[in-house]
Image (spheres, rainbow, N blue to C red):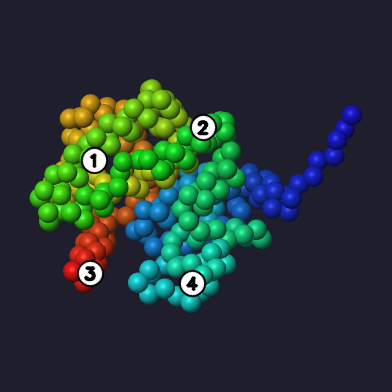
Amino acid sequence: QNKSLTTTPGETMLFLSVLLAAIVGNSKIVYGLRLWNSGTCPYAQRTWIALEEVGADYEMQKVDLQNKSEEFIAKYSEANPGGRAKVPVLEVEHAMTLTESVPCTEYVFEKFAPASFQSVEQKAQARLAVEIHPFNYFQLLRVRNDPEALADAVSSFGASMQHFNSFLLTCSPEGPYLFGDTFGFADACIAPFAQRCLITLRFFIDIELFEVCTLRNAHRTKAYIEAILDRPSVKATAPDSDVLLESTKTMLLRFDDTKETKR
């Protein structure tokens, strides 16, 4: 017995776009996506990586976060009325506008690469990985001028590498990604922070990320970092190291000024 199949207008548009791409020999998926992105924000890079991973055809809209345009503020308000405008903002033509890096990134993978989630349990583990990853580099940088506080922060950082190593082993003993050979949502969310952790810790406080992993026997974590940072989508979306360091210096100066004001 035949059953009729119904599709949404968005799904029909996606099918026709993929069909057209196949006819003209274009491997990109055309779906009417626009990403508002500053170019240096690790949160926006998460969604940028996802778009590159799934082969989406998207438009990039550059945002100056120190001089936000009225257009950007209005677009952000479509997704989060009353919120403070920030990146990423992801526009999906004829459907919706999203903000916040986790829902934006998860949407891209769910819509265009649903096979990257193999089960509900795996999806829950992926979300947990995004919450507990140890690459919060700013926690160390903000105490860089306080030797005692920095020593405590470095010790805690090393311990967190060990704990994450144990977590990775429960997800996939061999790796190299969170779930074996599949680069997915969690990897895209974690990569920008591992990237910045490696660069900024070396520059500002003379700490080598891979050495910390080795000293703490966090070999699965070390292999994980190497794998996600070697991913073409992560390399393609990475800010230049000099630009990243200048951006981090500016952020630290703002933090230091705020700290002094509160005294």
Mark 3 surroundings: few (<14), some (14-19) or many (≥20) residues within 10 A = few
The numbered mark, 1 or 2, whose residue comes first in the sequence reads 2
Q: Earlier in the sequence, mark 2 or mark 3?
A: 2
Residue visible at 15% across and 48% down? 150
Mark closer to the observer (1, 4):
1
Q: Label 3: which residue?
A: 262
Q: Residue at x 18, y 39 (%)?
A: 155
| Residue furthest out toward the right | 1
| Residue depth check, mark 2 versus mark 3: number of the one nearer the observer | 3
Q: Which residue is mark 2?
A: 122
Distance of mark 4 from mark 3, alpha carbons? 29 Å
Disc 1, SS: helix
Residue type at mark 4: give it: Ile
- As drawn, the residue found furthest toward the front would be 263
Residue 22 sits in quarter: top right
Q: Nearer the viewer, mark 3 or mark 1?
A: 3
